[in-house]
Amino acid sequence: MNRLNINFKPKFFETLKSYDKQTFAADAMAGIIVGIVALPLAIAFGIASGVTPEKGIITAIVAGFLISFLGGSKVQIGGPTGAFIIIIYGIIQEYGIEGLMIATVLAGIFLILLGAFKLGTIVKYIPYPIIVGFTSGIALTIFTTQIKDLFGLTLPEEPADFIEKWCVYAKSFHTIDWWSTLVGVLSVVIIAVTPKFSKKIPGSLVAIIVMTVGVFLLKKYYGVSTIETIGDRFQINSEIPDATIPSLSWESIQNLISPAITIAVLGAIESLLSATVADGIIDDKHDSNTELIGQGVANIVAPIFGGIPATGAIARTMTNINNGGKTPIAGIIHAVILLLIFLFLMPLAQYIPMACLAGVLVIVSYNMSGWRTFKQLMKSPKSDIAVLVTTFILTVVFDLTIAIEVGLVIACFLCMRRMSETTNVSVSTDSLNPNDESDMKITQEKLTIPAGVEVYEINGPYFFGIANKFEEVMSNLGNKPKVRVIRMRKVPFIDSTGVHNLTTLCEMSKKDHINIILSGVNPKVHEVLKKANFYSILGEANICSNINEALTRAEEVL
């Protein structure tokens, strides 16, 4: 019995072999800057997800450390991201914080299994329109959730449904608070303008500092009391929570298996996309399976300390690269900086205006939307447009879990369809040209096919998507031959449906007194057929290594 060979090689240990002071100086500077950049985002993502602000920071600390320490990328920065906001919020609404913990731990286990079974590369084959549909839909949903805080609206209720939410906003827009609106709009402007003056200082941090100080002065000296801050909504706690192990039961696992898979798939897609983008910039190659295992461990440990789901964050990873980060040490330093801020400066977070955080998330949703890519994809073939729009609408109007499930099913159908299009079946009844035949012994200009013999060539994978096509080709021919030679030299693999199809063909051919001969079966396909006991039906004599032997055998049968 073959043992599972887990190829787990964190980049942290690899980079230590040639680590020096110069590299540490670069990593330290990048880690400090990324830690500062991550602070407002961690708070904003935590609140938007329906948890307290400190949970967002704890996630960035714990998961950020583990993803850098155990991951397969040199520069990946992990933590809470906008992609998870909607799914986390939905889980909390239905199953509570305890349910979120269980779903996150299960997602971590799934991610480890994906990496252990070396399925990291498969995630990369999810069609691009599906990924764009997900991210654009999530971006619009995040933007929608921030309207209340951005304009300081007073709502009778805040429904979870997208359409109902906008209906409530429309009815409640007369309750707009102009001071909150001013704070939100100015925050968006500051974040958008800051990169034009400084590439190093994050606009979100500038906006939070300026708006927090401004709102504090307005409240203290001018009596403006309508601007809601984090402290008005949450009680800030700067203590590291005790480790809590969620109580797993079979019922809770059954209920949360679907959201957990959604978290795992979404986390795998986002982290590997981020790592791939980083590879192109730093001219390196990440280990996708190790990355998934690192992500999985992070998502198992983070909820034990009160954290939420985490993954690789493209924006923070790019900030790390742009500021000189070279190794996972930069990501570890970023986690240490966040820990220091959490322990000593967290009480100051209570003065941050909610409208300012809404402005931060509005920019996040805009950057995440990829509207230019969406617009470009609308010029693609109709099938791609249908997939893009379907995934987008399902994400926005229904539920991210449903969108991912349907999206993955669509991806499978697209893959099967395209594979079936690449596989074709051809028929020869007269002669074969040796110049076109790689497995023929060239002894003459043409190899004549005896009367009563038909030669079929299957070019491509012989799986359930092509089995019926083969049957159709044979049924369209008029006269029944005495011998059918099936050439399989260009068949890289065969599945159980293909084996069943061949078995049925042999049994039906026997009833019609037609002999079947296989030619050029490769070792992989041969092994599958042998295990399926297929050769007991056909007979070893009718398995030939090349077309010359097959036609010679056909003449013997005749």
Image: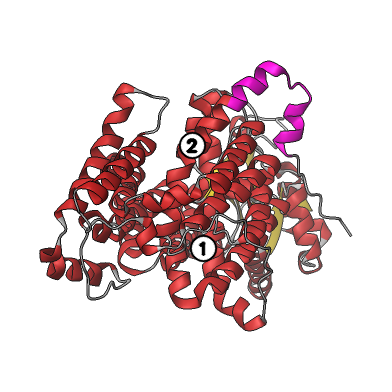
In the image, residue 27 lies in the stretch drawn in magenta:
yes
**What is the span of residues highlighted in magenta in the rendered image?**
10-28
Q: Residue flagged by tag 2: what amino acid is it? A: Ile
Left or right placement of residue 442 versus residue 271 in this view: right
Please say if the residues under marks 2 and 1 sit with CB atoms less than 8 Å apart. Answer: no
Q: What residue sits right under mark 1 in the picture? A: 262
Does residue 474 appear anywhere in the picture?
no
Residue at image x 30%, y 60%?
145
Asked which quadrant contains residue 541, the reply is bottom right
Q: Which mark is residue 77?
A: none
Q: Position of residue 512 (x, y in %)?
A: 63, 73
Q: Is residue 456 visible in the rendered structure shown here? A: yes
Return the residue at label 2. 36
Query: Is 17 rendered above or below residue 508?
Result: above
Left or right: 159 as drawn, with respect to 425: left
Look at the image and say whether residue 420 sits in the magenta stretch: no
Q: How far across and how far down the image is residue 463, in percent?
A: 59, 59
Q: Position of residue 122 (x, y in %)?
A: 59, 49
Specify the principal SS of the magenta part: helix
Q: Residue at x 43, y 53 (%)?
A: 45
First in sequence, mark 2 or 1: give its number: 2
